Amino acid sequence: MGTGKVELSHYRPKKFSHPPECGPCTFQREIHIWTNGSALDNGLETCQASVGWISDLEFSDSVSLSGIPLSNNVAEIAAVILGLSAWEAYNLVVHTDLTLVLKLVHRGLLAME
C-alpha cells in the first residue's frame, strides 16, 4: 500500500470558547472526553473509518475519514486529536482504549502547538 494523506471529510471542527453552563467565565474544572475510532477493512485501500468524541458536558462530535492509509489505529489517534482540538483552552482528561495513543502522548508526539 502506498502512502497518502488522511483527511476529515467535509469537516468543520467544533470549537468551544466556553462551556455553555458558565458563559464567558473562568471555568476551573477538568473536562473529561471519551474518544473512539473504528475502521472497516482495516489497513486495506477499501478501508472506511469514522471517529468521534463525547464530553462529560454532553457535547460530542464525529466525522468520517478519507484518504489512505486508514486503519483502526489512525482512526483512534484522529479521534483524540479531534477532541483535543475542540477543547484547546481547557484542562482535559482523555479516555481512550488504545495503548498506542497513550504512548504517543507520553512521548510528546501528539503535543499541540
Image (spheres, rainbow, N blue to C red):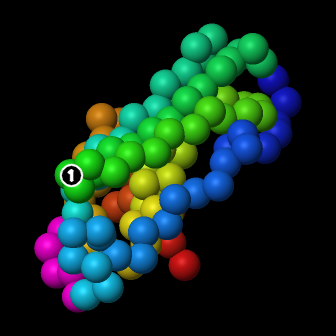
Q: Which residue is drawn at 30% across and 35% down?
A: 97
The quadrant of the picture occupied by the N terminus is: top right
Residue 34 pos. (x, y %): 29, 44
Q: Residue at x 42, y 69 (%)?
A: 16
The quadrant of the picture occupied by the C terminus is: bottom right
Vertical comparison of 37 with 111: above or below: above
Is residue 2 left or right of 14 when viewed as pictured?
A: right
Q: Is residue 110 magenta?
A: no
Residue 32 pos. (x, y %): 22, 56
Q: Is residue 43 in sight in this rendering? A: no
Q: Give the range drawn in magenta.
A: 26-30
Is residue 87 left or right of 41 when viewed as pictured?
A: left
Vertical comparison of 8 with 1: above or below: below
Q: How many circles with numbers are drawn on the protein?
A: 1
| Magenta highlight: main SS | loop
Q: Is residue 113 in sight in this rendering? A: yes
Give whichever of 13, 23 is nearer the camera: 23
Residue annotated with mark 1: 56
Residue 112 pos. (x, y %): 50, 72
